């Protein structure tokens, strides 16, 4: 009895230590996980170059350079489209002003109606209002420190991804050799399943984002949204953000349409975003990602809540692949398969 109690206490302490490490080690762990996902994105290209007699270090460098060139090109095109939109904005200033004035008049009417029903309480003319001015610089210093830490962490991502790509074989074999001989086959299979899951997750999200971008752009074109081809893809990919996606995906099309479309048309834009989001959530995600992730909706929701609390916005982005990787590990560890089955949809991995 005493041994069982001590074992349970040790497990609780171990879990608490892991949670504390995740919470306080957020910058390091998030940077490593993003680098791992980036390495998995570039691995097919590096492998293809290696099969064409390009040594892996050179292939990894080429892949990273192509990725940064693509990101720069996309950012540059987005900047040009944003500049064009800003130039066109004065044409719509009159309509925007009319819309703002109309909303302001409605707000004033509502305020007058409220005052007619519930008159304001008289205030003492001798009352002096004191406004406190915050002269504490600690908030600004802390925000500056957070920005510096973020930039510092981001600067490590390309180097980590490069070394992960060049030393992939060594890292995988070394990880397998950590385990006892009788468990090495299981460890190797587990790593392969995690790698397949991450690739499927990344490729699936990109494919879903492209589909949603095309559908959104077509719908926005039909509704007359300015720069529908630019706004549609931004809205489609923003809709991939867990839980908050449907809200943030509305911002670009509504901002572009404000002052140019009527209230009914703006409502149609919002409904379009919601419909596209529900389509991806109920059709595209189960078809493209469901077979690989094998997580039930309850676990997905809990994982988003947990990792969002631990790591904030980055936790929301990393929650699903991280939880899916944990499930794969549980499915392959003797004695922990029931926990993996609890997280899944009734199917189990077979070793």
Image (spheres, grey):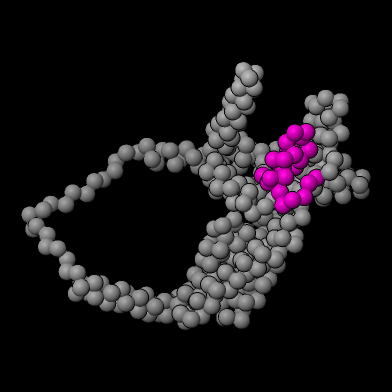
Left-right relation of 123 to 70: left
Left-right relation of 23 to 107: right
Residue drawn at x 85%, y 40% as measured from the top left? 351
User: Considering only vertical position in the picture, is 348 above or below 92?
Assistant: above
Q: Which residues are magenta?
A: 323-349
State whether the magenta stretch is mostly helix, strand or loop: helix
- Identify the image quadrant of residue 173: top right
Residue drawn at x 76%, y 52% as measured from the top left? 292
Residue drawn at x 24%, y 46% as measured from the top left? 132
User: Considering only vertical position in the picture, is 186 above or below 277?
Assistant: above
User: Considering only vertical position in the picture, is 114 above or below 48?
Assistant: below
Residue 57 is situated, as x and y percent measured from the top left of the image, at 82, 39
Residue 249 is situated, as x and y percent measured from the top left of the image, at 56, 64
Left-right relation of 324 to 191: left
Taking the magenta stretch, the answer to whether it contains residue 84 is no
In which quadrant is the N terminus drawn? top right
Outermost residue, front side: 1
Q: Nearer the viewer, residue 293 or 258?
A: 293
User: Considering only vertical position in the picture, is 218 above or below 51?
Assistant: below
């Amino acid at each position: 009895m005493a041994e069982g109690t001590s074992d349970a206490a040790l497990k609780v302490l171990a879990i608490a230590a892991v949670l504390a490490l995740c919470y306080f080690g957020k910058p390091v762990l998030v940077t490593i996980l993003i680098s791992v996902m980036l390495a998995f994105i570039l691995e097919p290209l590096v492998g293809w170059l290696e099969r064409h007699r390009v040594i892996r270090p050179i292939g990894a460098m080429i892949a990273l350079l192509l990725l940064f060139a693509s990101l720069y090109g996309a950012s540059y095109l987005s900047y040009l489209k944003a500049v064009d939109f800003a130039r066109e904005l004065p044409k719509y200033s009159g309509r925007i002003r009319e819309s703002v004035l109309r909303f302001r008049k409605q707000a004033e009417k509502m305020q007058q109606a409220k005052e007619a029903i519930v008159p304001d309480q008289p205030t003492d003319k001798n009352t002096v209002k004191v406004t406190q001015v915050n002269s504490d610089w600690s908030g600004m210093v802390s925000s500056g420190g957070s920005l510096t830490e973020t930039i510092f962490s981001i600067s490590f991502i390309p180097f980590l991804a490069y070394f992960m790509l060049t030393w992939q074989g060594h890292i995988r074999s070394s990880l397998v050799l950590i385990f006892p001989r009788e468990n090495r086959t299981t460890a190797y299979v587990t790593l392969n399943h995690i790698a397949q899951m991450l690739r499927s997750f990344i490729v699936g999200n990109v494919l879903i984002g492209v589909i949603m971008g095309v559908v959104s752009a077509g719908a926005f074109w039909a509704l007359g949204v300015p720069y529908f081809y630019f706004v549609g893809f931004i809205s489609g990919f923003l809709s991939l953000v867990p839980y908050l996606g449907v809200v943030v995906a509305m911002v670009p099309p509504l901002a572009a349409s404000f002052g140019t479309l009527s209230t009914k048309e703006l409502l149609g834009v919002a409904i379009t975003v919601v419909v596209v989001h529900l389509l991806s959530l109920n059709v595209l995600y189960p078809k493209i990602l469901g077979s690989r992730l094998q997580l039930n909706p309850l676990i997905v929701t809990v994982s988003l809540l947990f990792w969002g609390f631990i790591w904030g916005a980055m936790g929301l982005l990393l929650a699903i692949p991280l939880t899916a990787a944990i499930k794969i590990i549980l499915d392959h560890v003797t004695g922990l398969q029931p926990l993996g089955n609890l997280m899944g949809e009734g199917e189990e991995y077979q070793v």
